[in-house]
Amino acid sequence: MSLLTTHQYKLAKGESLGYLSGGITLSPAREAGRILHRSLPSVCPQSGVCADLACLAATGHNQFPTHARARARRTAHWHRDPKGFIDQAVLEYQALERRAARIGYTAAGRPNLLSDLPGMARAIARRVEGVRFYDYTKIVEAATARRSPVHLTYSVSERSTAADVHAVFARGRNCAVVVSDVGKGEPIPRRFTRFGITRPTIDGDRHDLRFLDSPQHWVILRWKGSRARREIATSAGWALPMLQVSA
């Protein structure tokens, strides 16, 4: 079974910018264990409300049972044989790099489309230097690490603190927030404030290539999912009103 996919709506947006992107879709949080009826560790150690209500696994083609079973099998592969998993991912990313070169593109990789395993991503990236790797992470220690072959954007959640956000911005990096009151196609305000921290914004839905973003910005991602899930996620503090100002 292959690990990489290039047929994903957000990844495909990078083609207009000259990038051919490939991502790895594992089961978020503990979904794989539920599907395979076995005990498997979570691949999203800092997941909270998003695991059950707001994850992109509940949107688009990701919610189809066939897709869920496929990512569960990939997740089981990772837990069963992490070295073999990384070896296979390296080969597939090398093939993506060659394919991109043939058509005059640059290869890009997002190893954690639904998971949050920075160590796995780093292990792959160190062996495929010709691919621009990037990810989102809720793990503040990963987002503030001094050096990494993977460009990371910190994903703010209901568990995030002002100290977390300050630390990320102090490293010259970006923080992503999901907003609940800006619809598809609607413009986002030029600045956003959270935890009393005001920064300029980037529309994170225009493309997925976060390594192209200017530093020390809020990356704004519009809510994707049902209205009922949005209301619960907003009540829990995971999705935020765009105009909210928090101390």
Image (spheres, helix red, strand yellow):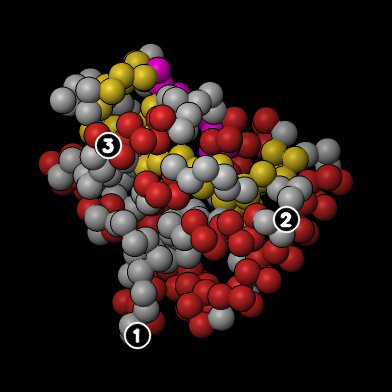
Residue 83 at x, y = what percent?
Answer: 61, 76
Q: Which quadrant is the N terminus positioned in?
A: bottom right
Q: Amino acid at mark 2?
A: Val
Q: Residue at x 48, y 46 (%)?
A: 145
Mark drawn on residue 38: 1
Tag 1 secondary structure:
loop
Three-letter amino acid code at the position of disc 1: Arg
Q: Nearer the viewer, residue 65 or 161?
A: 161
- Tell me which label, 2 or 3, sits earlier in the chain: 2
The residues tagged by marks 1 and 3 sit, at their Cα atoms, a distance apart of: 37 Å
Give me the residue at 74% from left, 66% from top: 91
Q: CA distance from mark 2 to mark 1?
A: 33 Å
Establish if 194 lies above or below 122. above
| Magenta-span inclusion, residue 145 | no
Q: Are marks 2 and 1 in contact (CB under 8 Å)?
A: no
Q: Residue furthest bottom?
A: 38
Gap between marks 2 and 3 measured at Cα: 34 Å
Query: In the image, residue 99 lies at what x, y percent?
Result: 80, 51
Residue 35 can be seen in this image: no
